[in-house]
Every structure is written in structure tokens, then in C-alpha cells.
């Protein structure tokens, strides 16, 4: 259970953010995040605001990670993890589900973080920084496309030639994400440039195994691009299904047992003059089942 609730009793009145910073040792950024996520509140459930004067008993939901995955490689600045399918990269809200961050922070401490993320449904390699300086360097490498990523996926339909998918993607804004199915991105001429190169590796009846090279990194890029060209990923729960089915999936997402046939297979990058290449084979379920 990553989040635990702890109670504190303040004998002197103080501002909420000062309590978090001065009494509990959080940085300004961390204190702001706690306030924004509504993790500081009174026992009656009243949410405490940043500059609110607080006194007496208050409750704080604290993230206490418990490691359950071991890294497959450790460097002084970063570590490589193999994320299973149906596991969040970051914890969501104040729920008690596991996330990859449990293992990253549980092993390497609170300053260790995923440098990028994979969707809940997607399995594969994730790069984590072990301290803030490394996080800045590694995230910059992703921003300027200095990290080469390769995915594999089984899709519906026969694809016999390699191709570049060049379709702009419009991601939902903060308000849209709060709406039903607001998590979905869409193909839109007003969206951001999105490029995905695909190469067929195997064809079995009405299904194709693809090797996939995302040139850009938009939210749900591979999933929405493959749906847009008429070749949805097998077991895709959001794109290429009707709204009712997608809503039902989102309502019970954390209990899902289905495997999306999409796997982040490898990462290839140079760091401080040294080239690193990491690869983990996909563990797809039997297609015949």
C-alpha cells in the first residue's frame, strides 16, 4: 500500500505550507504538490489550502513505497526496469494500488524517478534517474530525441510493407481529461506533429507482428496511429472500441487481466560518452487463446 495516512497535532497555529516545509522537511515543490493533490486535510475530510492557518489535528497522506520489482541494470545515475503490462508507472490519486514508482523509490529513495512513462497497459523497458541532476540530463535527452526506442506489437489485419505514419495528434487538455473518455487523444490537423515508422516482422492469418519506431513521443501515439490506419493493437481497450466498452474498461481498469499486445522492447542512447543498449523480449500471451 504506497499511501498511508499519518496524523499530526499542531499546538501552535501556522500556515499549511510552512508546516510541511519547516516541521516535516518537505521542499517548496514537494509541499505545493501535497497541497495540490489534496493530501493534507482535517480528520473531518476538509481539504487544507496552501496559505490556510492550521491548528490541532491534521491528516497527511504520505507515499511510502514498497519495492516489488528489481532493476535489470544499475548505473550510478540511472537504473533500468522491466515494467509488466497492467501496471501504472506513477501512482494515481491516493489509491492503494502498486505502481512502478513503488520499486524505483523503494530501492533508490525519494529523489529517484521514472524519466519517461509507459501506459498502464504497455509492458517493457523504463529508464529511471537516481537523483535530480541525472533526471534533468536524461529527460533532456528524451526531449531532443537522443533516445532511440523500439516497440513490438501484434495488430489486427495484414500489413505487408513498412511505412511511416505521419498524422498529427491532439492531446486532451486538463479540463477535457476530467470528462468521460477525456483521456483519449485524437488525430487532428491542429494537433502536434507525430511520426511513427512501422515494419512488419510476421503475418499470421489476419494478424501482423510489427516492429515500431516512434520518432516523436505523443501521448498514446503508437496506439492511436495504428488505430487510425485501420490496424488496432490486439486487446486495445480505448481506440477502435465503442464508447460504452471504453468507459466500462476505464471504470475497472486497475482490475484488468487482459494483455495489450504492445511492448517497449529496447532503449538505445549515449550518456556521458558511453553508449547503452537495453533490450527485453516481449512476453505476449498465446495468440490462439
Image: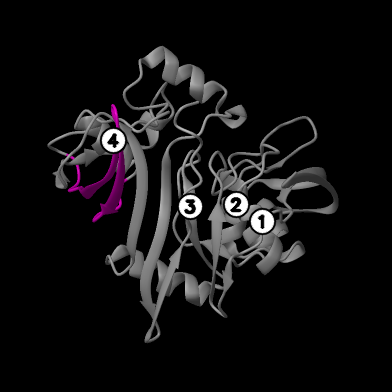
Indicate which disc residue 196 carries.
none
Query: First in sequence: mark 1 or mark 3?
Result: 1
Identify the element where label 4 is drawn. helix
Q: Please tell me whether mark 3 sits on a helix, a strand or a loop.
A: strand
Task: Please give the residue where the numbered disc 2 appears in the rendered image.
Answer: 100
Does residue 238 appear left or right of residue 221 in this picture? Answer: right
Q: Which sits earlier in the primary sequence, circle 4 or circle 2?
A: 2
Q: Contact (CB < 8 A) between labels 2 and 1?
A: yes
Measure the C-alpha gap from mark 4 to mark 2.
24 Å
Residue 68 image point, x, y percent:
71, 53
Residue 288 position, x and y percent, is 46, 27
Query: Would you say 171 lies left or right of 287 here?
Result: left
Distance of label 1 from label 4 (alpha carbons): 29 Å
**Toward the viewer: 133 or 6?**
133
Which corner quadrant of the image does residue 149 belong to? bottom left
Look at mark 3 in the image and give the residue it sits on: 124
Image label count: 4
Q: Which mark is residue 69?
A: 1
267 up-or-down from 249: above or below: below
Nearest to the eye among marks 4 and 3: give it: 3
- Image quadrant containing the N terminus: top right
Magenta region, main secondary structure? strand
Determine the image quadrant of residue 224. top left
Q: What residue do we see at 57% from left, 23% from top?
A: 252
* Label 4 – label 3 distance at C-alpha: 19 Å
Residue at which label 4 appears: 224
Amino acid at each position: 500500500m504506497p499511501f498511508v495516512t499519518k496524523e499530526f497535532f499542531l499546538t501552535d497555529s501556522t500556515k499549511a505550507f510552512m508546516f510541511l516545509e519547516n516541521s516535516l522537511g518537505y521542499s517548496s515543490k514537494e509541499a505545493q504538490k501535497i497541497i495540490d493533490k489534496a493530501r493534507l486535510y482535517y480528520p473531518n475530510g476538509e481539504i487544507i489550502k496552501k496559505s490556510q492557518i492550521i491548528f490541532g489535528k491534521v491528516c497527511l497522506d504520505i507515499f511510502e513505497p514498497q519495492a516489488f520489482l528489481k532493476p535489470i541494470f544499475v548505473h550510478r545515475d540511472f537504473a533500468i526496469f522491466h515494467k509488466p503490462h497492467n501496471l501504472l508507472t506513477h501512482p494515481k490519486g491516493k489509491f492503494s494500488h502498486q505502481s512502478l514508482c513503488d520499486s524505483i523509490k523503494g530501492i533508490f529513495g525519494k529523489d529517484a524517478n521514472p524519466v519517461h512513462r509507459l501506459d498502464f497497459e504497455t509492458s517493457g523497458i523504463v529508464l529511471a534517474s537516481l537523483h535530480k541532476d541525472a533526471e534533468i540530463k536524461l529527460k533532456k535527452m528524451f526531449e531532443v530525441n537522443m533516445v532511440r526506442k523500439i516497440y513490438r506489437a501484434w495488430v489486427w489485419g495484414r500489413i505487408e510493407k513498412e511505412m511511416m505514419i505521419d498524422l498529427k495528434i491532439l492531446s486532451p487538455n486538463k479540463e477535457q481529461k476530467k470528462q468521460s473518455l477525456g483521456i483519449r487523444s485524437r488525430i487532428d490537423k491542429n494537433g502536434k506533429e507525430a511520426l511513427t515508422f512501422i515494419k512488419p516482422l510476421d503475418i499470421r492469418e489476419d494478424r501482423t507482428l510489427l516492429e515500431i519506431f516512434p520518432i516523436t513521443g505523443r501521448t498514446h501515439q503508437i496506439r492511436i496511429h495504428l488505430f487510425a490506419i485501420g490496424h488496432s493493437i490486439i486487446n486495445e481497450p480505448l481506440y477502435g472500441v465503442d464508447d460504452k466498452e471504453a468507459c466500462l474498461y476505464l471504470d475497472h481498469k486497475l482490475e484488468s487481466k487482459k494483455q495489450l499486445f504492445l511492448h517497449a522492447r529496447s532503449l538505445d542512447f549515449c550518456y556521458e560518452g558511453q553508449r547503452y543498449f537495453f533490450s527485453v523480449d516481449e512476453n505476449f500471451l498465446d495468440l490462439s487463446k
